[in-house]
Amino acid sequence: MNYKNEYKKYLTSSVLDTANNKITSNSFLSAFAIYLGLTDFAIGIYALLDTMTNVIQVFAAPLFSKIGQSKKVVLINYSIYRISSVCFAFIPFISNDLSIRTLLFFIFASIYAITGKMGYITFVNWRMTLIKKE
């Protein structure tokens, strides 16, 4: 394992994740939900989505240990995570119907939250492999 190359990958991934997290922060997406015209009830449910998906993190470690930390699985998960965060921007162009906007918002928010929670544990595990044994 080349430590410098792995460190560069880690740094790039960290920068992308930080940017992704800022773009899809709860306050930004809540404001976007208001812009889309979602009801207060829907926005409240969205605010709880992160808390509800924390349960997934509990099961992510055993799930990924059984998969065997497959690099392909981790990359697919993170690709879906990042793509779903960008999909929010297309909602206003897809439909003006509030029901469809709400549905799309929650589909993208759920995918984003679930893949983010699943990916967090694998990302931490990968970072730990970068630490020198000595």
Image (cartoon, rainbow, N blue to C red):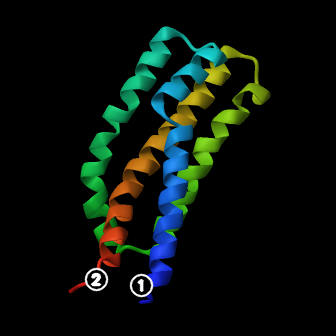
Residue at 30 percent across and 71 percent down: it is 128
* Residue 121 lies in quadrant: bottom left
* Residue 97 lies in quadrant: top right
* Residue 79 lies in quadrant: bottom right
Work out whether 3 lies above or below 126.
Answer: below
Q: Quadrant of the N terminus?
A: bottom left
Q: Amino acid at mark 1?
A: Tyr
Residue at 45 percent across and 11 percent down: it is 41
The CA distance from mark 1 to mark 2 is: 8 Å
Q: Residue furthest bottom?
A: 1
Residue 122, label in figure: none
Mark 1 crowdedness (10 Å alpha carbons): few <14, some 14-19, many ≥20? few
Q: Amino acid at mark 2?
A: Lys
Q: Quadrant of the C terminus?
A: bottom left
Q: In the image, is 55 to the left or to the right of 31?
A: left
Residue at 66 percent across and 15 percent down: it is 98
- Give the labeled residue for mark 1: 3
Residue 132, label in figure: 2
Q: Nearer the viewer, residue 19 or 77?
A: 19
Sequence order check: which comes first, mark 1 or mark 2?
1
In percent of width and height, residue 3 lies at: 42, 84
Q: Are marks 1 and 2 in contact (CB under 8 Å)?
A: yes
Q: Nearer the viewer, residue 128 or 86?
A: 128
In percent of width and height, residue 129 lies at: 32, 77
Work out whether 79 lies above or below 91.
Answer: below
Q: Secondary structure at mark 1?
A: helix
